[in-house]
Image: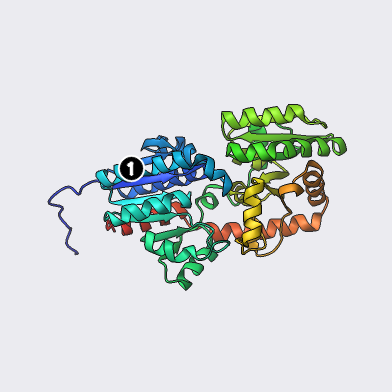
């Protein structure tokens, strides 16, 4: 019989500093906190958090929405505020001395913060790799110096880091664990009060106010264009926040071709489960749509200055921007960027997908394969890696 270890003194609680950017970071952070708490019941976590992380027990020094800024040129307007916030956080984390700091997404903000904390002797993890494999690849060496570990959500990311001698681990995507392999569309429709035989189109214009401002008019126009040709379609739009809802409502009211669009607070995954297809802003929502097994059309729009810089400086190194196409390595779903994002372009592309049974079968098979590849117990794996980095394994 093996000896039973006797603990002579209670271990100090695990203390984790966190900074999560916007809605998707909040989701990842909440799942990570829950997984960490299973392994370290006395967990203490604090930093920048969204509502889900706060509900999971994270003490919020600032809200995750404060980092919800996209694009190169767009950051300039917010730069003084972001610099002040980062300096304040560096000082507070250095004083608090967490066992480990976890920057969740928002790499431009978190990696610079991690550099300061690492110099102060605090272990640092970046959870969600920046798209260094796609643009500004030279950053990989800097990331290796600024972090002790990068946790990757996508399988090809860790391979890229290994090639550059940076410690990284593919943990899978927690959304792939949360969203079931078999979607209960009938249950979702019943919960939303939608007929089982309705043709349902989901509209997901984004979670950041800036991206919704750029995409809302085109999404509303696309709904109107589709309605003019398929008047039986039902349109559902899950709204990430009250501000997003207000912005989207204004654009819907101003659309030349109008469709009745039902706005729903949150519940994006339920809406996607109920939908036949979706118009989606580029980002995490495209992965949620993929994991829900639904055909989609993806739109991406930034300021003219950001688009000019990306194009002129040749910073982008990949042929696609949506996660389904990146994961498949081929143009699986239609993508529209900048001036190509129009109501007619989005609407006609979506109807073309719905009217192509062979393509729909291809999407279902490929989406299912990707779902299984990403379904690895992501939050648990991430928690184990964070504990090891903190010296608690």
- The residue at the far right in this view is 229
- Check disc 1 and report its element: helix, strand or loop: strand
Q: How many marks?
A: 1
**Is 248 rendered above or below residue 104?**
above
* Residue at left offset 57%, top offset 44%: 74
Residue sitting nearer the eye, 94 or 43: 94
- Residue 47 location (% of width, % of height): 36, 41
Give the class, few, some or many, for how many residues have Cα within 10 Å of label 1's Cα (few <14, many ≥20): many
* Residue at left offset 36%, top offset 36%: 61
* Residue at left offset 41%, top offset 50%: 103
Task: Report the side of 222 relative to 131 (left or right).
Answer: right
Q: Please state, as top left, top right, bottom left or bottom right, where the C terminus lies in the image.
A: bottom left
Q: Please state, as top left, top right, bottom left or bottom right, where the N terminus lies in the image.
A: bottom left
* Residue at left offset 47%, top offset 44%: 21
Residue sitting nearer the eye, 33 or 47: 47
Q: Quadrant of residue 356?
A: bottom right
Q: Quadrant of residue 193?
A: top right
Describe the colour scheme in one phrase: rainbow
Task: Report the side of 13 relative to 7 (left or right).
Answer: right
Residue sitting nearer the eye, 335 or 202: 335
Residue sitting nearer the eye, 146 or 174: 146
Task: Report the side of 259 relative to 21 (left or right).
Answer: right
- Residue 391 location (% of width, % of height): 27, 58
- Residue 22 location (% of width, % of height): 50, 41
Q: Is residue 178 visible?
A: yes
Q: Is residue 182 visible?
A: no
| Residue bearing the label numbered 1 | 45
- Residue 182 location (% of width, % of height): 62, 50
Q: Quadrant of residue 2?
A: bottom left
């Amino acid at each position: 019989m093996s000896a039973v270890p006797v603990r002579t003194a209670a271990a100090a609680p695990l203390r984790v500093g966190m900074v999560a950017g916007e809605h998707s970071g909040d989701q990842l952070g909440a799942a990570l906190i829950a997984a960490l708490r299973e392994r370290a019941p006395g967990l203490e976590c604090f930093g920048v958090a969204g509502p889900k992380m706060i509900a999971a027990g994270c003490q919020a020094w600032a809200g995750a929405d404060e980092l919800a800024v996209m694009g190169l040129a767009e950051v300039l307007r917010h730069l003084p505020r972001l610099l002040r916030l980062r300096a304040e956080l560096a000082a507070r984390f250095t004083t608090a001395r967490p066992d480990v700091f976890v920057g969740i997404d928002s790499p431009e903000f978190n990696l610079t913060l991690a550099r300061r904390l690492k110099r102060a002797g605090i272990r640092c993890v970046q959870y969600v790799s920046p798209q260094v494999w796609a643009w500004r690849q030279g950053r990989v060496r800097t990331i290796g110096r600024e972090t002790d570990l990068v946790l990757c959500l996508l399988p090809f990311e860790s391979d890229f880091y290994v090639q550059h001698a940076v410690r990284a681990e593919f943990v899978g995507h927690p959304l792939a664990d949360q969203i079931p392999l078999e979607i209960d569309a009938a249950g979702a429709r019943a919960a939303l009060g939608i007929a089982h035989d309705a043709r349902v189109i989901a509209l997901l214009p984004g979670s950041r106010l800036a991206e919704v401002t750029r995409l809302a008019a085109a999404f509303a126009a696309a709904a109107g264009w589709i309605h003019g040709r398929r008047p039986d379609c039902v349109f559902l739009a899950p709204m990430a926040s009250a501000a997003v809802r207000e912005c989207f409502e204004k654009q819907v009211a101003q659309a030349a071709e109008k469709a009745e669009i039902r706005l729903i607070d949150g519940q994006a995954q339920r809406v996607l489960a109920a939908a036949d297809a979706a118009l989606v802003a580029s980002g995490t929502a495209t992965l949620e749509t993929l994991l829900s097994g639904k055909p989609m059309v993806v739109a991406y729009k930034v300021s003219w200055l950001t688009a000019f810089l990306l194009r002129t400086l040749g910073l982008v190194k990949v042929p696609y921007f949506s996660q389904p196409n990146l994961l498949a390595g081929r143009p699986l779903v239609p993508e529209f960027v900048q001036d190509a994002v129009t109501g007619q372009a989005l609407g006609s592309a979506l109807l073309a997908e719905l009217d192509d049974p062979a393509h729909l079968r291809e999407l279902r098979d490929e989406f299912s394969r990707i779902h299984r590849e990403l379904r690895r117990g992501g939050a648990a794996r991430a928690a184990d890696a964070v504990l090891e980095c903190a010296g608690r394994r």
